[in-house]
Amino acid sequence: MVFSVGSLTARLMFVGEAPGAEEERQREPFVGPAGQKLTQIIEKAMGIPRSEVYISNICKFRPSTGPGQGTNNRQPTPDEMASCLAYVTTEIALIRPEIIVALGATAAQGLGIEGPVGRLRGRFHEFQGIPVMVTYHPSYLLREEQTGDGIRAKRAVWEDMLKVMEKLGLPISAKQRGYFQTK
Ligand code: URA
C-alpha cells in the first residue's frame, strides 16, 4: 500500500491514478518520473512548496501485472479503484481541500467524472461539493514530450492550473501567465 503525502491543512489536493514501481519502492506517491514532473508543476510553475499540498491516488496499491512485473505499470480497474474509494473520500473529508485536481481520466472516473480529459479539462466539476479540475496526467506530458506536441500539452495543463490558482486567489505574475505559450 502507498498512502498519501502532504499537509493536513492543504488548500489544494492532487489525485493521481495508482502508484508505480518507484512509488511502491519508496512508499510515497508521485516520486518516479511522473512524480518529478508533477513536483515541477507544483513548485516551479505554480510556486507552491510540494509539502503544502496534499498528494493522493485513487488506487492505493500498484496494480499487478502478474509475476515478474518488473517496472511495468498498468491502470487500476474500476473494481480496484472502488476498493480504495473509502480511503479517498475519508482523506477528502479530513483535509477539506478547497480544490481537487484529478490527474488524468482514470482518477476523474474514480471520482465519478466520466469522459476523455480533452472534453473534461478546463472547467470545474464537483466531488462531494468540492470543485474538481480534471487535467492531463503528468505521464501524458512525458509521453507528449517524447513523441508528440509537448508544448501544446504543457500549455493545456498550465491553463488548467492557472484556473486553479485564480480560484484559490493566489498571485499570478505576467511571466507565469505566459508559460508554455506557442506564440
Ligand atoms: N502515477 C500516479 O498516478 N500516481 C503515482 O503515485 C505515481 C505515478
Image (cartoon, rainbow, N blue to C red):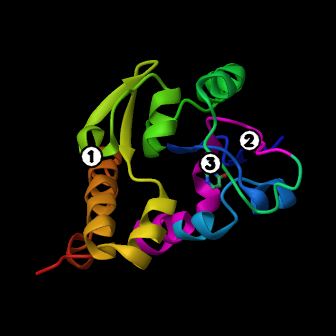
The verdict on label 3 being within 8 Å of ligand 1 is: yes
Q: Tell me which numbered mark, 2 or 3, is placed earlier along the sequence.
A: 3
Q: Residue 55 carries which label?
A: 3
Quadrant where the image shows the C terminus = bottom left
Front residue of 25 and 124: 25
The residue that appears at 24% across and 40% down in the rendered structure is: 119
Magenta segment: 38-66
Quadrant where the image shows the N terminus = top right
- Looking at the rendered structure, the secondary structure element under dot 3 is strand
Q: Name the residue under label 1.
A: 118
Residue 37 lies, in percent from the top left, at: 53, 69
What crowding class fits label 3: few (fewer than 14 Cα within 10 Å), some (14-19), or many (20 or more)?
many
Type of residue at label 3?
Ile
| Quarter of the rendering containing residue 117 | top left
From the viewer's perspective, is the residue at label 2 or at label 3 nearer?
A: 2
Q: Name the residue under label 2.
A: 63
What crowding class fits label 1: few (fewer than 14 Cα within 10 Å), some (14-19), or many (20 or more)?
few
Cα gap from disc 2 to disc 3, whole angstroms: 18 Å
| Quarter of the rendering containing residue 174 | bottom left
